Image: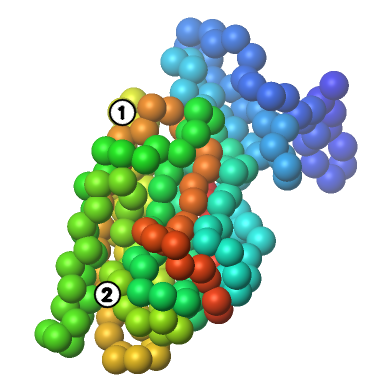
Amino acid sequence: MAKITNTGVHIVEGSAAAADTGGEGQIWVKSDTPSSLYYTDDAGTDNRISGMALQTSVATTSGTAVTYTSIPPGVKRVTIIGKDVSTNGSNEIRTQLGTSGGLVTSGYDSTIVGLPNSANCATNTQTNSLAITQGIGAGETRSWLQTICLLDASLDVWVCSVVGARKTGENECFSGGGWVDLSGDLTQLKIFMDGSDAFDSGRINIQFA
């Protein structure tokens, strides 16, 4: 039962909004971990209004992928943050998005380019993921922000931009963008390499709102 105290309004958590009523919206608390505040309009569209949530960062000192599987439905922006990330080979680093049905592995349109060194101004274009970096040498560190935003809730189209820099090896910046059409709410994502390389340094985290 909801209650009002001298310090706040307490709303019991639920897994979903109540049935829609024409001309009425709902404020409710979803039973995420931790819980999230939502507004649902009379058309049944859920809007998460809890503000920016920062997850727990992951040390990328081993392994071939970092996966986040607990993104709440209704999120409209996700930022992937990489700090001094390197691999033991020259594979490119990429992101795949997913819904409750699993990760999406096709239908992407994504390009990234390294600047300004013309000798390494390589373009990385992908159709199975959103590119974060082009391939560089083993042990060379990269830091970046990849921001992925919902273009239209009725279409589930997500558009991304990425900007970053490599600190070791030949110093350079890289940037790019892309998009993918999902079949529902974004609830998970994976950062991985395009081959068999493994992470060997750095840290990755995500924020969402």
- N-terminal of the two: label 1 or label 2? 1
Viewer-proximal residue, 186 or 199?
A: 199
Q: Which residue is mark 1?
A: 155
Can residue 141 be seen at all in this image of the molecule?
Answer: no
Q: Amino acid at mark 2?
A: Phe
Q: Residue at x 19, y 82 (%)?
A: 120
The kind of residue on which mark 1 rests is Leu
Q: Secondary structure at mark 2?
A: strand
Along the line of sight, the residue nearer the viewer: 25 or 183: 183
Which percent across, then down, holds residue 203? 57, 72
Judge depth for marks 1 and 2 and give the one in front. 2
Tag 1 and tag 2, C-beta contact below 8 Å: no
How many numbered marks, from 0 up?
2
- Which corner quadrant of the image does residue 93 belong to? bottom left
User: Where is residue 182 shown, x and y percent of the image?
Assistant: 36, 33
Question: Eyeballing the image, is 161 above or below 158?
Answer: below
Residue 174: image tag: 2
Q: Nearer the viewer, residue 105 or 142?
A: 105
Look at the image and tell me in which quarter the N terminus lies: top right
Placement of 170 over or under 5, stated as above or below: below
Q: Quadrant of residue 121?
A: bottom left
Q: Residues within 10 Å of mark 1 (few under 14, many from 20)?
A: few
Tell me the residue at 25%/47% (across/down): 127
Q: Which mark is residue 40?
A: none
Secondary structure of residue under mark 1: loop
Near mark 2 (Cα within 10 A), the count class, few <14, some 14-19 or many ≥20, is many
Task: Name the side, left or right, on which 131 lies relative to 37.
Answer: left
Q: Left or right: 43 with respect to 201?
A: left
Q: Is residue 156 left or right of residue 39?
A: left
